[in-house]
Amino acid sequence: MKKILFIEDESALQKTFGEILKQEGYEMISALDGETGLRLAKSEKPDLILLDLILPKIHGFDVLKKLKGDKETKDIPVIVLTNLEKIEDVDKALELGATTYLIKAQYSLEEVVEKIKKVLQE
Amino acid sequence: MNFKGILSQLNIVAQCRKYGLSLWQCPQFLFLVMGLVITISTLTAYAIGTRYIEDPRMVALIVLLATAILFIIAVIITNSFERLAEANRMKSEFVSIVSHQLRSPLSNLKWAIELLMSGKLGKIEEKQTEYFKILKENSDRMGELIKDLLIVSRIETAKLPIKKMEFSLEDLVKELIKEFTPFALASNAEIKFLSEENLPKIFADPSQIRLVVENLLDNAIRYIKGRGVVEIKIESQARQKFLTKNLGGQEKNIYFKIRDNGVGIPKEEQKYIFQKFFRSGNILRYQTQGSGLGLYISKAIIEKSGGKIGFKSQEGIGSTFWFTLSIK
């Protein structure tokens, strides 16, 4: 069973994604802040990381930078899932090594799940 | 006000850019011009005075004193204008912050509804589906409104980023027609598309022009009553030039036109149509939904892209909206 780490401070979203990903046959691990996210990325070795950008303790960009700077986690694909929609933010995340950048307001739940499946297949 | 404050006040170009105003709309610049005019007129008065009065120094002193007073008044007016502009900017920023904050709970709501509707948490009865649909439609509407509000606040704080590039308007329109076909079918409308062959590409920001075409197409379909036809036409303005005399010169434009046979806009409402939050009385009558921001946004985008936008409408017959954009 493939493991997905979801770093997101909104517990409502954690719950929704936990449910849908379970239904799709994935195991989801939650982290409610950046620090926990980084720790779990190392200890749990997930197959994919879903990352919000506005996070308590460590900002999403710094989490991304640290993930990509550590040889233990640098190969794990990261999907950024956020409501920040400035072009600069998108460019910055992709430059730091994010696989895909999804703006929450623009995608349905089903579309996000499709993107996750696609990245996991590659 | 300290010396540094005065110096930064003197940087008029930077000040005006902060408000997103052009020089000639900017109070600071206008008052500088006013000051110059007064100074020049004082000097002229002095020159004239030397000829006609025995002691011209007194005259000049009085005029200079008057000028100084005028200058002080001008500074006071400038400051009050500045305060006004600042308040307006803060209002737009406030709208932006609130809209952003609304997005998170709205995403939670939207996705939770989608999960419920997917039936993955248990079977839903038909009667419940109806209400889930209402929840879904209204959370989508809220999402659209927030999106529009964010664009408006960016327009008003002059922070709307424009990334101009060459692209085909024809392809963009075709893509959007495809997207809107289900909505058109549901509204009993047919979308026709006519395009001149080998149209040149336009030079603008595709994501923003997309918003404009989306808004116009959405409006055209929305206001159709009964069976309807929406007709979109794109042509290069070389041909259009023969029709309208005042478009001479080298400039080449692309002309986009969308015509519907919908309810039309009552004559007395036509002058308000591009205003923010304006919604026609016909909306209430035909119960269509919208934020009242679409045309305001469309006008701002087309004008920022260097084009023109306009419309013709007759109540009961339909409306035609058009815009032009330049070819690189």
Image (spheres, coloured by chain):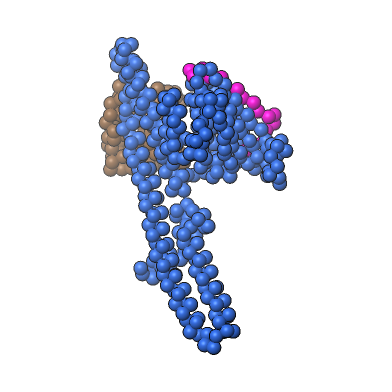
- Rendered blue, the chain in question is B
Which percent across, then down, holds residue B21? 49, 53
From this view, report whether residue A44 is shown above or below residue B33. above
Using the image, determine if residue B308 lies above or below residue B125.
below
Q: Which chain is brown?
A: A
Q: How far across and how far down the image is residue A40, in percent?
A: 29, 33
Q: Is residue B75 above or below residue B47?
A: above
Residue B174: x and y in percent read 58, 26
Q: Quadrant of residue A82?
A: top left
Residue found 36% across the figure and 26% down from its top: B138
All told, the count of numbered labels is: 0
Comparing B220 with B282, the one in front is: B282
Q: Is residue B56 magenta?
A: no
Up/down of A20 relative to B206, above or below: above
Residue bounds of the magenta highlight = B186-202
The answer to whether residue B269 shows anywhere in this view is: yes
Q: Residue at x 40, y 22 (%)?
A: A110
In the image, B61 versus B328, the foreground residue is: B61
Q: Give the residue at x 63% y 31%.
A: B234
